[in-house]
Image (cartoon, rainbow, N blue to C red):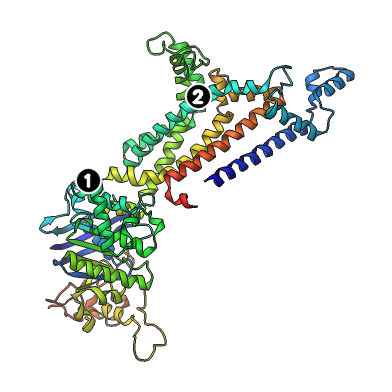
Amino acid sequence: MLSVRDLCVSFRTEQGEALAIDHVSFDVEEGEILGVVGESGSGKTVSLLAVMGLINDPNATISGSIKLRGRELVGMRPSALRKLRGGDMAMIFQDPMTALTPVYTIGEQIAEQITTHQKISKRGALDRAIQLLAEVNIPKPEDAIHRFPHQLSGGMRQRAVIAMALSNNPSLLIADEPTTALDCTVQAQILDLVRRLQREHKAAVVFITHAMGVISELADRVMVMYSGRIVEHATKTEIFRNPQHPYTKALLETIPPLTGEKPKRLKVIPGAPPSLFLRPPGCAFAPRCAYRFEPCIRVPSLEGDRHQAACFKVHPPHG
Amino acid sequence: MIYAILRRFGQMLFVLVGISVMVFAIFFATPGSDPAARIAGRNASPEVLEAVRKSFGFDQPFYMQYLLMMKRIFITGDLTSFVNRGWKVVPAVIDTLPVTLSLVVGAAILWVVFAIIIGVVAAATRGRWPDKLLMVLGLIGISMPVFWLGSVANLITQSRFKDTWMFSWVPPLGYVNFTESPKGWFLALVIPWITLAILYIGLYGRVLRANLIEAMQEDYVRTARAKGLSETRILLKHALRTSLISFVTLFGLDFGALVGGSALLTEVVFNLHGIGKLTYDALLSLDLPIIMTTVLYASFFVVIANALVDVAYIFLDPRVRES
């Protein structure tokens, strides 16, 4: 349904050209949840902002192809793209505290999105907003539409944001770390909510997170990103049972075990991800990798059939 | 709500009392400002000085003099000038009120409307030529002193091009009562309005542009884009409303100060006998009753303008409503 091919996003900066996304290709099928994992700065958010057409930095260059139900989004007229945005594809952001305009009520903001994309009266849009708020388990939705964002808790605001994103029944929902800013119990509720709504609306969901725990709860497939590239891509069970890329393995090892002896120290991955300007010439993870060997001075391509990994250890270089 | 109004009123009283005491103290503490000597004129004999002192009440203790002056401003309203004996101060101040209000309100309408247009257009075309052009014009507007601009305007409309088709409609300098002739009132004030407004248009336009550009970086603007709203709607509906808060704060301060007498330069240049001109003349002759009355009047307007700003906040920002 969504098909991204050779997506590159680069930013012109004072220090030179920064390639934030380097030839990223992936697909999202109807009704599945794709988890995208990676550290901060790995390009997970930027690549999906590019899908939404929300990178409006004049210094950014986007190339490659993004197709939503066969329609090319790269280079699409802004007005046409705007019709899809908030309509057929919607996005939820990380921080619910700042994601809503402080001076309008929840109802007004949801109704605004509905009337932008559908021919419907203001009253009808508000009624639909009440329905949506009920659907995301906000108590007394008919009162909640008259509330301003600051009058709701973080969890309630995130529900309102989700309700807003779903208001036009999008077929693609992108969730950018929607639970990171919330506390644990609320996180679990929001995750349940996303899963339930995904089933009810039969939407495809791309879930961006840095928490492997969230991925294991929610995703059907997992894409691991590192320094603007995809390093591993497989089904969730595959990733958790049989991680191939050393980075994925290291990420999984950072999850503290729930059973058995308590580790003395939590595991960490030594080093830090490379800056976009000083990306090593070969495999970007090589400087932090315990398994590195000579071929790693070249960039490994993403290889494999159903379980893809970009590592010479897994797929030795040809010839 | 009633509590808020009462509190505001109490605050105003406090400000007025404080300011009046301070003006009074400064007047008598100014070195060499023996008021009796000023009134009696140069070379006055000691007997005359003594007589003046007695007749103006300067021989009484300060607090009595202060209380008497307050009583004559607020209760009997018959305070007279020290310089022109018999000239009643309170009616004189009230007479200037329509002049200053006409000038400042008209200019304020101009500057709010044009500053919003300029700020929005510049923010929408950020970095492109309309933005650059408007910001340069704004800077020029801010840089031109109002007395110079006013004089140039007079030079053009009252002398050089007075008889051409362009400016033949401009009436001679001075104020025309609205009740006398609404048209004459309007024509007499057009040039002063523009002159006074230009500085503020530049200033407010730049402030609004900066606030709008800042607001456009906010998370909620990204959400609004993700909703599929057009850039125009995002700018006008989501960014402008939150940006107007600091605009309104500035406006309250400037408007209060202008009504209180800061429009002096414009008033002098265009020969409008407003509160600023009155205060200025009184300062030249150290005429305490007038200075006292105009200063109290000015502080009253500053406090009122701030109260109005608070009301505006309540409309603009729901977060203020509960506190």
> Compared with residue B122, is residue B141 higher up or lower down, i.e. above or below?
above
Q: Position of residue B287 (x, y in %)?
A: 71, 24
| Residue in view at x 44 percent, y 34 percent | B202
Q: In the visual, does B74 lie left or right of B125?
A: right
Q: Position of residue A108 (x, y in %)?
A: 31, 50
Is residue B195 at least partly visible in the picture?
yes
| Residue in view at x 89 percent, y 20 percent | B46
Quadrant of res A214: bottom left
Sort mark 2 into few (<14), some (14-19) or many (20+) by Cα contacts within 10 Å.
many
Sort mark 1 into few (<14), some (14-19) or many (20+) by Cα contacts within 10 Å.
few
Residue that label 2 marks: B103
Q: Nearer the viewer, residue A254 or A262?
A: A262
> Compared with residue A294, is residue A191 higher up or lower down, i.e. above or below?
above
Q: Cα distance, mark 2 to mark 1? A: 45 Å
Q: In the visual, does A87 lie left or right of B295?
A: left
Residue that label 1 marks: A121
SS at mark 1 in the image: loop
Is residue A95 at least partly visible in the picture?
no
**Label 1 chain ID:** A
> Compared with residue B218, is residue B250 higher up or lower down, i.e. above or below?
above
| Residue in view at x 22 percent, y 46 percent | A121
Which mark lies nearer to you, 2 or 1?
1
Inspect the image, locate mark 1, and give the three-letter code of the amino acid beneath it: Ser
| Residue in view at x 43 percent, y 43 percent | B315
SS at mark 2 in the image: helix
Q: In the visual, does A26 lie left or right of B227?
A: left
Q: Nearer the viewer, residue A305 or A217?
A: A217
**Label 2 chain ID:** B
